[in-house]
Structures are given as structure tokens and as C-alpha cells.
Amino acid sequence: MAGNSFGKLFTLTTYGESHGPALGGVIDGCPSGITLDLDAIQEELDRRKPGQSAIVTQRKEPDTVKFHSGIFEGVTTGTSIGFVIENTNQKSHDYSHIKDSYRPSHADYTYDKKYGVRDYRGGGRSSARETACRVVAGAIAKQMLRGIEIIAYVSGVGTMKLHKAYNELDLTKIESNIVRCPDQDMAANMETYIKEVRSKGDTVGGIVSCVIKNVPVGLGEPVFDKLHAELGKAMLSINAVKGFEYGSGFHGSTMYGSDHNDAFNTDGSTKTNYSGGIQGGISNGMDIYFNVAFKPVATLIQEYETIDKEGKVVQMHGKGRHDPCVVPRAVPIVEAMAALVIADFFLINKLYG
């Protein structure tokens, strides 16, 4: 299997399956001499871990990260940072019913056809549990990028969407509710809705918005390695993501150029920021902001029709522990992938200018 690594200079390679003994990763390219707050790294994992509230999967995993290399007395050494997260609460028998059948909109069919074998327990390598490794690496990248703020939050669940921009919201309120929406009234409505959806054995999608503040001018390359292109790739590599837009996004296609152009101030900043902090693939010093759309979780806790390995139509009933809506737990994952992209370009810029 190819494609287990991300990044050019600041790189992450992950390994492991959802129901294997452990997940883990190796981070290469992290500079030496960075003092790490290991508790802060664990706190990022705690934001992503299962079982943290009534509206997420009830799989109980401590998701404790153990570092095996690359850190000495809390400081990075410049060598590979190896880490492991043990799985402790697998219930593999919950997946015996899909051993010879394919769940709709899952990776079951494609994995079987591509590799000829698949770990059906929780999706194996295709499980979103792999994203725990990304959160570890992203937490380290955040600490390397001191002064740069990366803040994500839930801005939509189903048809419920915030109609305020990030700079109109109190982003300090994100962690004050289990939905991770900075608008308290909307958060309460979203929570109620997610619980209703779950009670029906169904699922619902949503949107995670993200803003990156204090990014210096000059990150990104102007042709194939545009900053927004790499951010898009990073976000689209997250399980269940179906869409990415930055700056004015799709709404920008409805505007006149005279309205959309970001006029300059004398210091090089812009009066508006429809560009989303990126012009010509390169950061311009303004806030970078984007939205990430997540589909509804494919596993339904209800009966449905599918096919088995022989192509025969069979009836299946979803089992296991699954999120009725992934976006509350996706917030730290979006932040982590954004941090990996910015950290990578920061080192590229330092090396090549």
C-alpha cells in the first residue's frame, strides 16, 4: 500500500489499523531544539478521542501517546520522532457480519478489489481512527509554529449553518460545548438535532470551518505546490471529507470582479480578504480561512440492502460503535492537517526562500 506519508520536508508516516494492537507514526524533518509541551499534545488527542460525549461513538479509548524517539528531556533532537497509540477497546466481533459483505459508501468493496484482502474489523486501515496519528504530528507542528494560530470550529450540521464569519464569532467559546460550535444557541440546537438523528439509527454530515492567523507573507509555491492546493489535499485526505473551499469559495463565482478584488492598504494588507489570505498560491499575510464539508457517516444502525462478495443481494443491519455526526471530533483533525501544511511550507521557505 502506497500513500502512507504526508509532506515534503516536515513529513508524517502513519501505520496501524483500527482493531490492530496499535496505531503509530514517524515524524521526520522536525528541527532540533524545540521544547515540547507533551501535555498539550495529549490534550489535542483528547479532543479527538472517542467516548468524550453523548453525541460521538462510545468506543472507550484513552488514546495515550507514547514517544519512542526524537525527543530528549522534552526537547526535539532533530531525529525521527517515533510514537505509538495503543488500541485497548476493540470489539472486533461487532464486525463479523460484514466479513463477506460490503457496506454501502464504505471502502469495503474498493479495498477488496484493489488488494484482494481486507481487514473488515472496523474498516482496518480505512478507519478514521488513523487520524489520531495526524493529531499527534499536528500538535507538534503547532508548537513549532509559535505565533501562528490555527483555530477550527463546527459551523454547520445538516441544514443548520452559522451565517456569521469567523471574525464575527467569539472563538474562545468553541470548547464550551460538545458540538464545538462558537455560537451557544446554535450549538444547543445542533446537539439536539444530532441526538434525534442518532435515535433513528441514522447519521448526518456537517461543516468544519478553520482560520489560520499570523501567517507570514511568502508561504507556498506558484505552480503545482500552491498553498491552497496543499491545504485542499490535506483536508480531502481526511476520512468522510467531500468538499473544500477557501476564501470566497463558491460564493466568489457569483460576484463581479470589481466587488471581489481585494484593494490594497499602503502597508500591503488588503481592505477585504476574499482571497482567503492566499494569492497566486502564496500567503499574503492576511488570515487564511476555509471550509471543509463532511458527509454523513456511512454506517447506519438500521436494516438496509447491499451485496456480498458473490454479488448477491443481502440484507444487513449496521452494528458497532459509530459517530452519528463526525464534525465535533473532526475539529482537531482539521487543525492538525492545516498545521502540517503550514509547517512543511515554513521549512521549504526557510530552505529555498
Image: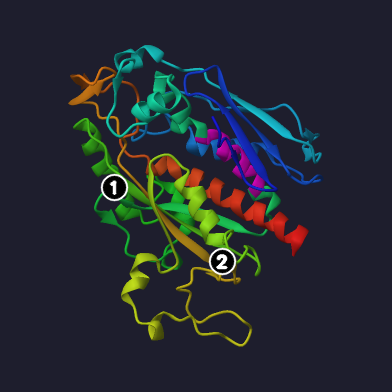
Q: Which residues are magenta?
A: 131-141
Asked where in the image residue 134 lies, by quadrant, the reply is top right
Prevalent SS, magenta region: helix
The percent position of residue 214, horizontal first and vertical second, equals 62, 65
At a point 72% along the width and 26% down the height, the residue shown is 68
Q: Is residue 58 visible?
A: no
Q: CA gap, disc 2 to disc 1?
A: 35 Å
Q: Secondary structure at mark 2?
A: loop
Asked where in the image residue 44 lies, by quadrant, the reply is top right
Residue type highlighted by circle 1: Met
At a point 56% along the width and 21% down the height, the residue shown is 22
At a point 53% along the width and 25% down the height, the residue shown is 62
Vertical arrangement, residue 319 with respect to residue 137, above or below: above
Residue type highlighted by circle 2: Gly
Vertical arrangement, residue 159 with respect to residue 259, above or below: above
Which is closer to the viewer, label 2 or label 1? 2
Q: Residues within 10 Å of mark 2 (few under 14, many from 20)?
A: many
At a point 40% along the width and 15% down the height, the residue shown is 91
Q: Quadrant of the N terminus?
A: top right
Vertical arrangement, residue 197 with respect to residue 265, above or below: above
Vertical arrangement, residue 331 with respect to residue 17, above or below: below
Which residue is under mark 1? Answer: 190
The percent position of residue 262, horizontal first and vertical second, equals 48, 80
- Give me the disc on residue 281: 2
Asked where in the image residue 79 lies, by quadrant, the reply is top right
Q: Are marks 2 and 1 in contact (CB under 8 Å)?
A: no
